[in-house]
Image (cartoon, rainbow, N blue to C red):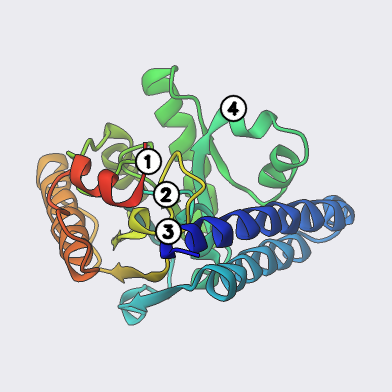
Amino acid sequence: MSSSSAIAVRSLVFNALFYANLIVHMLAALPTLVLPRCVLIAFVRSYALTSLWLLRVICGTTVEWRGLDKLPKAACIVACKHQSAWETFALYAVLRDPAYVLKRELMWLPLFGWYARRAGMVPVDRAAGMAALARMTARARQALARNRPVVIFPEGTRRAPGAEPSYKAGIVYLYGRAGVPCVPLALNSGLYWPRRSLRRQPGTILVEILEPIAPGLDKDAFMNRLQSAIENASRRLIAESGIDDHTSGAGVRSVIGDS
């Protein structure tokens, strides 16, 4: 069997077990809807850790966390590069009870939406403009007041590794009103768990927590600093992967088979 065929078979096996793991956890967690919220968070963390274990054992895809000492012990905003579905669950391995900012439509899904609401996630209606940002920020501040990290993807959607960045106003609005540090997080997950693809590449996903940005910067200075920090570090992590032609989204997509 060729290396490419072996990766395809492993990816198929992993995806079957990954979604089975999700279903088992979601069904087993039903009683948590009426139990203390900490019990649900334990289930979510279990799902994240078992999913990372399956990825390592079946696909040979490991993760290296860098800069964990830079995470504030108090409440903060975690502004994470978004290349893959991987970071939507994997951060539970290192963050205590994170509150993710997610699109409102996900809250309507059976089971998932119930758990997201119970877990205190932060929905945002992308079509509602400034009113949506105000509601999102109010909910995020409630989470921060409970000393929870708020995770937001500044580009709003997944971007292929090397693609031109597209940062949205939501992160600036939240930073300006939250009064807490913003921690940039860079990664290269899209090389190994590409968007719009079921293929899982062997290798090491690199995640780097960067120096926190203290509150109080004006919006332009903050955006410039945040984007520069995340994009420069993410490019470095992509280069460190050793995958050729990483300097453009098209080049990376051709290597990993992303669409």
Residue 197 placement, left or right of 38: left
Residue 155 at what x, y percent from top left?
A: 31, 39
Q: Which quadrant holds residue 35?
A: bottom right
Dot 3 crowding, Cα within 10 Å, few <14, some 14–19, many 20+: few
Q: CA distance from mark 1 to mark 2?
A: 6 Å
Indicate which disc, 1 or 2, sits on the residue closer to the N terminus.
2
Mark 1 lies on residue: 158
Q: Which mark is residue 4?
A: 3
Q: Earlier in the sequence, mark 3 or mark 2?
A: 3
Question: Residue placed at 45% from the left, 25% from the top?
Answer: 132
Q: Quadrant of residue 189?
A: bottom left
Q: Which mark is residue 84?
A: 2
Distance (Cα) linking label 1 and label 3: 25 Å
The answer to which of 172 and 102 lies nearer the viewer is 102
Quadrant position of the C terminus in the picture: top left
Residue drawn at (38%, 77%) of the image: 64
Q: Is tag 1's residue or tag 3's residue first in the polypeptide sequence?
A: 3
Gap between marks 4 and 3, in whole Å? 36 Å
Total labels: the figure holds 4
Q: Which residue is mark 4?
A: 105
